[in-house]
Amino acid sequence: MTVIVFDTGVLISAIGWRGPAHRSLALVAQRRCRLAVTADILSEYETRVPSVLATEAPRANASGALAWVRAKAMWVEPAPLGKRRSRDPKDERFIAAALAAKAKVIVSYDEDLLALEKPFGIPVMRPAAFLAWMEDHA
């Protein structure tokens, strides 16, 4: 099964709106891929997702979606990265999780992560590109 990592912006978009991020999360629900998280990533999800969605998409069920992610995600310990890879040190958590989980893709809207293109050989792509990639690699 294809293991992936979502940055927080993708999860916010997936829960709050119907679009490529939502369809990417649906692939996890359909067991076509597996979402990997670390404790640090889940903590960020649980802090930022509800606060953003409360103002931007108040009808979204952030708590239910986060409980589902907590229950269904593959938990990993972050891999050591050595030197800093991203312009934004907070993005290192997603690279460390992907490396530890042997993820095939990091799905992101974050320009700092996208600029890396393939850290440790793991492609970073937007949700729409990920959906196309999954069609080719299913």
Image (spheres, grey):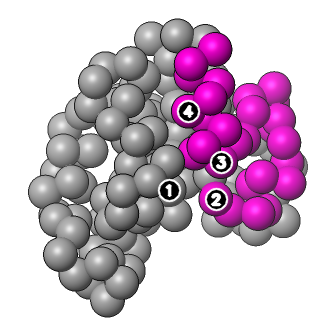
Q: Which residue carries the number 1 mark?
A: 10
> Which comes before the other along the chain, label 1 or label 2?
1
- Determine if the magenta segment contains residue 119: yes
> Which comes before the other along the chain, label 4 or label 2?
2
How far apart marks 1 and 3 lie (CA) works out to 8 Å
How far apart marks 4 and 3 lie (CA) works out to 9 Å
Residue lying farthest to the bottom in this orientation: 55
Q: Position of residue 28 (x, y in %)?
A: 35, 31
Q: In this view of the protein, can residue 71 be seen by the observer?
A: yes
The reply to whether callout 3 and callout 2 are in contact (CB within 8 Å) is yes
Q: Which residue carries the number 2 mark?
A: 109
> Which comes before the other along the chain, label 1 or label 3?
1
Residue type (three-letter) at the residue carrying disc 4? Leu
| Secondary structure state at the residue bearing disc 3 | loop
| Secondary structure state at the residue bearing disc 4 | helix
Q: In this view of the protein, can residue 100 be seen by the observer?
A: no
* On screen, residue 123 above or below 39: above
**In the image, which residues are magenta?**
109-136
Residue type (three-letter) at the residue carrying disc 1? Val
Tell me which residue sits at (28%, 24%) in the image.
Answer: 30
Q: Position of residue 55 (x, y in %)?
A: 32, 89
Q: How many marks?
A: 4
Residue placed most toward the observer, 29 or 95: 29
The reply to whether callout 4 and callout 2 are in contact (CB within 8 Å) is no
| Secondary structure state at the residue bearing disc 2 | loop
Tell me which residue sits at (81%, 30%) in the image.
Answer: 120
